[in-house]
Image (spheres, rainbow, N blue to C red):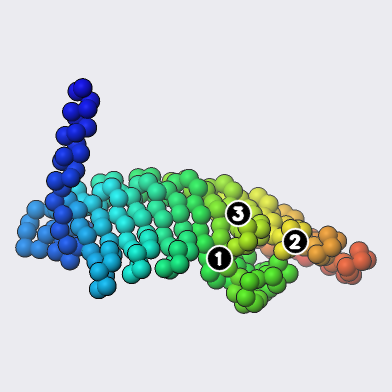
Amino acid sequence: MKKLLTLTCLLILSSCAKEIPSDQLVKRQGVFYEINTTTPFTGRTVGYHKNGQLKSKANYKNGKYDDLRETYFENGQLKSKENYKDGERDGLWESYYNEDGKLEFKGNYKDGKKDGLWELHFHVNFWDYHMKVYYHSLPRYPGGAENCEDDRLFCPFYTRQNYKDGKKDGLIEYYRLNGQLLAKGNHNDKGLDGPNEFYYDDGQLEYRINYKDGKKDGLWEEYYKNGQLKSRKNYIDNQEDGLRESYFENGQLREKRYYSSPRL
């Protein structure tokens, strides 16, 4: 009976929380206040689009976001869902690209930092993205990019990756929008670490590249779509070093070269 009374009281207090239009709040030095007041705001806000559709709703405690905040497109479709605790991001976050409901990202925060599994959708070219971020020496359009939905200049994809204390940690996977694995690798707190693999649109291995603490280190292999080895080379501390071999598609040796990376 005591628990029931406590729950009833909480529901009554919740239903009586102050609610005001979102444009009646101002932000001063990171704290939200009602206009013409000096007391940090506690309660709820709501905002509407010009067509009358709900635009946003949010909860506040002592002038900071607390609990759930949601935003919406003009057609009523959810745009974002965010959770907070005492002003810090905490809990599930979701964001959508447009009114069709295409997911942009989904994941969890803990004490203001990304934590656990995140899913991120990109509507840009996968290979251009990776040349800029990680793989500067890859060919411009490896074979795996030829089967994009539109053309070779546009290859949307999504990732699944793990975070710990706000940093990428462990396995990261990249998928085509049809769900087929495009690439996978591992991260530690310094960057890519261990084997990273890229796949053709039929699932056949295209590249295998080894990293150590964010730098290319070890064997780099490239394969034809029929599974035959195309080239093989070695890296030490991000510099090519040792024997490089390349092969024709029938397996016949095409060329051998030797490289020596500078040593300190």
**Quarter of the image that includes the N terminus:** top left
Q: What secondary structure is marked by label 2?
A: loop
Instruction: Name the residue carrying label 1.
Output: 133
Instruction: Name the residue carrying label 2.
Output: 202
Q: Residues within 10 Å of mark 3 (few under 14, many from 20)?
A: some
Q: What secondary structure is marked by label 3?
A: strand
Residue 191: percent from left, percent from top: 55, 54
Q: Nearer the viewer, residue 218 or 3?
A: 3
Q: Residue at x 25, y 48 (%)?
A: 66
Instruction: Name the residue carrying label 3.
Output: 173
Q: Residue at x 19, y 53 (%)?
A: 44
Instruction: Specify the amino acid type for callout 2.
Output: Asp
Q: Foreground mark, 1 or 3?
A: 3
How far apart are labels 3 and 2 at the CA level?
17 Å
Q: Nearer the viewer, residue 26 or 100?
A: 100
Residue 45: percent from left, percent from top: 20, 57
